[in-house]
Amino acid sequence: MKRFLTMFAILLSLVFALAACGAASPSTHLKVDLMEFMFNPANLTVPAGQEITLDLSNTGAVMHDFIIMKYGTSVGDDFGDEDVPNIYWKAELEPGTSATYTFTAPSEPGDYQVICGVQGHYQAGMVADLTVVAQ
């Protein structure tokens, strides 16, 4: 019986740990590192329509963008001129720099694509997800 209770406690702890990792709580203050060729973290969650403070650090050796695409749009095989009208918000950082930005989160809840628009970076996998949740 003691062994059963111990196993049950371990399994219950594991379930709670996995549940906590599954859905990030929305935040109005995000910190993101940009590097070759990824965003860290790559999954961000914000409340709809709220002012967001975004601390970006380019820890890479080349320039990077942080581009949020409009709801319902995404980049195809390559980021190009045809994608520019679908940009919701954009920031650029030179290598080795950091900056703090503010923007208003989209009012439409849903999933938004975040990319780096520098030539070749999107194709190399520099993509993130921004989830906007209703408040």
Image (spheres, rainbow, N blue to C red):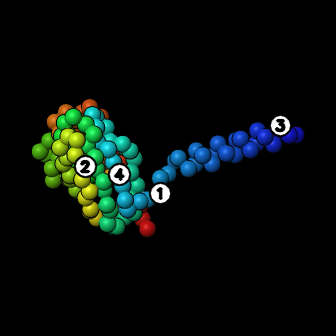
Residue 84 drawn at (x, y percent): 15, 50
Which of the 4 image quarters holds residue 1? top right
Instruction: Compute the Cα span from label 2 to label 4.
Output: 10 Å
Label 2: state its secondary structure.
strand
Q: Which of marks 1 and 4 is nearer the N terminus?
A: 1
Residue 82 drawn at (x, y percent): 14, 46
Residue 25, label in figure: 1
Q: Which of marks 2 and 3 is nearer the N terminus?
A: 3
Q: Give the position of the C terminus as an image quadrant.
A: bottom left
Q: What residue type is labelled 3?
A: Arg
Up the image or down, 38 lies above or below 102; here it is: above
Residue 40 drawn at (x, y percent): 36, 42
Return the residue at label 2: 98
Q: Earlier in the sequence, mark 3 or mark 1?
A: 3
Return the residue at label 4: 31
Up the image or down, 38 lies above or below 69; here it is: above
Label 3: state its secondary structure.
helix
Instruction: Compute the Cα span from label 2 to label 3.
Output: 52 Å
Residue 3, label in figure: 3
Which of the 4 image quarters holds residue 121? top left
Q: Is the Cβ of the residue at disc 2 closer than 8 Å to that at disc 3?
A: no
Closer to us: mark 1 or mark 2? 2
Q: Which amino acid does label 2 sit on?
A: Ser
Q: What residue type is labelled 1?
A: Ser
Q: Residue at x 78, y 40 (%)?
A: 6
